Image (tube, rainbow, N blue to C red):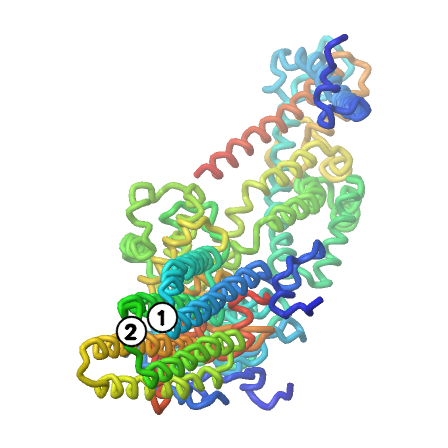
Amino acid sequence: MSPESSAEQRLRAPTMAGPTTNRAHFQAELQELELRALGGLDLVVEQLDRVLEALEHQDVELAQMVITDDDRIDGRYLEVHQGILSLLARQAPVAGDLRLVAALLHVIMHVERMGDQCVNIAKLIPLTGHQPPVREELLSSLSRMGGYARSEVIESKQAFAARDVAQAEDLVRQDREINRINREIFRLAIEVGDDPDVREWAMTMVLVARALERVGDNAVDIGEQVAFVVTGLFSEFAEGAVVPVPSPATGA
Amino acid sequence: MTSDGPTSGTTDVVSDQRTTGSLPDAVASSPAPVSSPIAPATGHTVRLEGLRAFYGSAEQVKGIDLDFEANHVTAIIGPSGCGKSTMVRCINRMHEEIPGAHAEGRVLLDDVDLYGPSVDIVAVRRAVGMVFQKPNPFPTMSIFDNVASGLRLSGGKRRGLQDSVESALRGAGLWEEVKDRLNEPGLGLSGGQQQRLCIARSLAVQPEVLLMDEPCSALDPIATLKIEELIGELKQRVTIVIVTHNMQQAGRVADRTAFMLSGDLVEVGPTQEIFTNPRDSRTEEYVTGKFG
Amino acid sequence: MAAPTVSESLGRFAPSPARRRKDRAARTTILVATLVALVPLAFILYFLLSKGLSAWFTSGFFTTDPTGNTFFAHSSIGGIKSAILGTIEMVALASVISIPLGVGVALWLVEYGRGTIYANVVRFFVDVLTGVPSIIFGLFIYIVLIVGTGSSYAGYKGALALSLLMLPIVIRSAEVILLLIPDSLRESALALGAPRWKVIFSVVLPTALPGMLTGMLLAVARAAGETAPLLFTAAATNSTTFNLGGFMNSLPVQIYNDVTSPTPSVVNRAWGAALTLVALIFLLNLVARLVSRRSRLR
């Protein structure tokens, strides 16, 4: 019997002895909403894994599955969006709760976009034909890129759940790697040669790389939301430097 | 808590400069907040310095330093019994009307200490008006007499009563509704109208500051919204301090919000900040409803 | 099979017979108590009317003074004019003295002295005074103003005794009404910048007046009907006089003197006087009620 996580403990319905804090019901709702939103990131990781495998093995059927399963992510988006509206209308959250709700809206939007990027990649796979000319170097770079993207998504979820700003900022470092590989892939594609079939394939791979890079960016954006929830300030985690942006919230 | 002067009791940063927290690079100190537009020449400020209020020997308000900006609305929020009503009643010196109650410290209205040794209390109350929680027009008086009562009772000028009454009723947004029945009893109006009548009554003596002690808690939602709209207009004429239990109301009407707890001022700042990113964890807990 | 009764069909909402019985018993008891209380009242009114009305219609009942002639049936015995006027004069003077004084004390108790020990002491003694038998007030005035100064009975001395009688009643009832006025009214007047005395006279008193009227009426009615104090202070005289410095007749004393007479017409006059007294009080009540209703509606 696994020990209950603290989140699950909090979600357990209060006994007839009565709630122990004010607004226990609201807090439970908020936590549930967060779990559902962050759960969307798990769905993204699933999609990412599958699409990367499809890419590696040129598995068109697997790619098709990814495309149809995007409905799950879209459904999750609608669910969380509705939950946010409901919470705002009924519970009038303020301060930290309000920032969390606003952040969850951002998070679920990024989840949805990441899902769309996975679909974009999946759609590119059949274009390469059944026996595409493959350059191993490119493929392995893509594979590494995929790995980084995957770990960024997982870590963004962890950072958010734990409200860990340091971990969120670390995402920038990983994203730099993705950007570096992206440039490398671009260079490799240029140098791929004159064969039109190969060139076509290489350009398709450039598009795949770009989609993966977008996934990374979305994960970094989620990291920025972590900082916002914790500090109340919105900062851009720009490449190489972290620069705070004066938000309209300060000042009279 | 040691008592080492008027600031004892305020445990948290009250000034507007943001402190740099222990958070990493992401958070640098933000620029100083945009200063409010220059108050019109007729604006009146109130400043509390080391205000303490007692019921007998029990200290209910424990040393408060607080500024109320001219022609702004400042809301005071806090749990029951935190001393917000007591503090506000010190501003127009109503607190000392309670047997055994007294106050210490300074209350400055435009640099005049209202607790100064030879200050006329009647003049203080003409300058600082008050609207109470339960609408209470004088039962034996007509609408006209109610509004005029402020002028008559405080010995104001007798000439131009008609004009003063009309101007006050217009200011309270009530003129159109009652102009044809000024001689009817004040109690014949609805709850919301009665409260606006009380506001008109206070406005007739042309106060510089208007204190409102939970003015809408006895009213229905529509009447409440009408009065909130009114407050938004009134602040151009008077400086307004409003005590409220209703945080959404503070959010709607107040420019600045102060949070009090157990007689101390915990935090004060622009309303938007208090409700999106309060600095003190006690404020955060109170506005999110975790206690109180 | 018989149709289910109402109780059976209602299930747990059926009225319980035991409770209905208790309810009925309670209502009957209270009704009986009310009737028992009303019966003597009805009897009094009946007697007053049946015995007094005939006196009212004797000629000159209201317009002539009693002649003092009580033994000879064929000589005129007169009416009760001086008694009526005397009562009105003395009660009016007593009211003029006791009502402002009494309201003043009540105002002090409620507006200035509330909560102080001194106020509690005063209130205690006022309560004691409401229970003091009226003859004591008469005796007090007698000893101080008649025996003490060596002077004789006078109408104003009777009025003084009556005012002492009225004072505690006025104070008590005025205080009750003043306490009923919500403090929020005083607060809002104060907050407008009114000095405390203005708050009292411009806001509190006008609001309290209709309620206080009833208390004042009670005091007046009580004073109008008291015999004992007047026996030692105003004595009685047959002729109508407006000189409060001399003897003065009054209705209660007139009744007291007449009722034991062997002459039936004199006894009859006593009943007529009693009915007059009650009618006077009734009239006062009516007037006060009309006044208070008008002031409330204004």
Count up the numbered dots: 2
Q: Which residue is mark 2?
A: A132
Q: CA distance from mark 1 to mark 2?
A: 8 Å
Which is more toward the observer, A188 or C34?
A188
Please state, as top left, top right, bottom left or bottom right, where the N terminus of chain B lies in the image: bottom right
Please state, as top left, top right, bottom left or bottom right, where the C terminus of chain B lies in the image: bottom right
**Left or right: C56 in relation to B173:** right
Residue B126 place in picture, x, y as percent: 41, 66
Residue type at the position of mark 1: Gln
Quadrant housing residue A215: bottom left
Tell me the residue at 63%/52% (across/down). Answer: C106
Are the residues tagged 1 and 2 within 8 Å (C-beta)? yes
Q: Which residue is mark 1?
A: A58
User: Does dot 1 land on a helix, a strand or a loop?
Assistant: loop
Q: Earlier in the sequence, mark 1 or mark 2?
A: 1
Quadrant housing residue B177: top left
Tell me the residue at 71%/66% (across/down). Answer: A1
Residue C75 place in picture, x, y as percent: 71, 11
Residue A185 place in picture, x, y as percent: 29, 85
Which is more toward the observer, A134 or B273?
A134
**Left or right: C31 in relation to A203:** right
The chain identifier of the residue carrying mark 1 reads: A
Q: Is residue A20 above or below residue C256?
A: below
Q: Is residue C182 visible?
A: yes
Q: Is residue B245 above or below residue A189?
A: above
Q: Is residue A85 above or below residue B79?
A: above
